Structure formats: structure tokens, C-alpha cells
Image (cartoon, grey):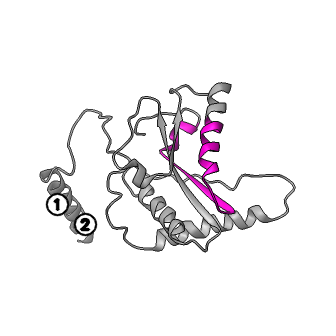
Amino acid sequence: DDDNILANFVSDVYRECVHEGLILESNTFSDQVVSSTHGLDQEFLGTFDLEELEKHILRAFKWHEGDHKYYRSPSFPMVQSSGMGKTKLIQQLRQKYHENDSNDIECRLILCMDRTQGVPPSFIKHYDGRLILGGPDDSFTRTEIDDIHHQLDKIAIACKRKKVIYIFDDAQMLLPGKSTGPY
């Protein structure tokens, strides 16, 4: 029946991935993850996700331009499992706006890192800047907040267009309960 066909197919694909070394089977937890730039030189497939992300961003800009009683930052989280294409998708958005000089929107891709992390391979090619954050404490000190503002000001100075999209990659360290490791 159909359920068994699908289960057998998934099982066969999984076995082949293990055999080829694409999946490592282990009963122990590993904190080894691939670099943030892994796979970014591969071709981006499809357009639907990119179009939907851009529509959402443009709606946020449009809402923000309206006259509202309270200020709200036009921001939103993008959450997905590791290795599913978030960075590749946002890199495509960044590339689209970098290539279009007639657009009034600029996109800056910023990698969030803790002080102990090294710069990933091809960092300059794929990111516009990095945001160096403190340790794994639950809250930021006034000094850390001032340091974050200073780092973002340095990135903002380089912006030339009217509207700027800041995209923070690996931004879990900006959230309460921050962690540099995989979820």
C-alpha cells in the first residue's frame, strides 16, 4: 500500500545517505555543525520562497510607512531547522537587492557570533558584517548593549539607500536564553 511504499522509499534514501557519509549515525549528542557559509555557493533552486519572503518584507515596510499611534519595529523572526536553507534564502534576497541599483531598498546580511567563534570560510563573500556578542548569559549588560549599538552603527554608515533590511543570521544569541550551539 501507499504508506509502505513511502516508508520504504524514505528508509532507502536514509540508508544511502548514511552509506555515502551524508548522515552520521550516532547515539551521542554532537555539537559539531557545519560552517554558516557551507552550501552558499550552490545554485539557489526555485523562486517561491524568495518571492514570499520579499512580499512579507514589502508589507512590513508599507505598514511602517503608515501613520500609527505606536511605533513598532518592522521586524519578524524566521525560524527553521538547521540546514534547511534559511541562510541561502536570505543570501538570495541580499543578492537581488545588491544587483538592482535602481531600487531604494538595501539588504545587509549580518552574522551573529560569540567572541570565541572564528570567522567562517568565505565570510566576506557572503556577509556584509558581523555582530560580536558576549557570553551565554540570559541578559545583556549596559556595556554589551552599547557595544551592539556601536557595531550596528558601523554597518549602518555603509548603507546608501533609503530603506535598509538588516538580516541577522544565527541570531539565537540575541534572544532570551541565548545559546551559541544547535537547538
Quarter holding the C terminus?
top left
Q: Name the residue tied to disc 1.
A: 12
What residue is disc 2 on? 6
Where's residue 38, x and y in %? 32, 51
Q: Secondary structure at mark 1?
A: helix
Would you say 25 lies left or right of 70 here?
left
Furthest residue in direction left, as rendered:
19
Which of discs 1 and 2 lies nearer the camera? The answer is 1
| Left-right relation of 27 to 82 | left
Image quarter for residue 42?
bottom left
The x, y position of residue 7, in whole percent, is 24, 62
* Amino acid beneath label 1: Asp
Q: Is residue 137 visible?
A: yes
Give the mark, 1 or 2, whose residue is nearer the N terminus. Answer: 2
Q: CA distance from mark 1 to mark 2?
A: 10 Å
Number of marks: 2
Q: Which residues are magenta?
A: 148-175
Which residue is at a point 56% across and 60% down the rendered structure image? 107
Q: Measuring from the top left, give residue 55's x and y in whole percent.
A: 60, 70
Task: Residue 141: tell me if it is visible.
Answer: no
Q: Is residue 48 left or right of residue 153?
A: left
Above or below, comparing residue 162 to residue 119 in the picture: below
**Which of these two is toward me, 81 or 131?**
131
Residue pictured at 36% horizontal, 70% vertical: 45
Report the quarter where the N terminus lies: bottom left
Q: Where in the figure is residue 174, as x and y percent of width and height?
A: 57, 38
The answer to which of 9 and 169 lies nearer the viewer is 169
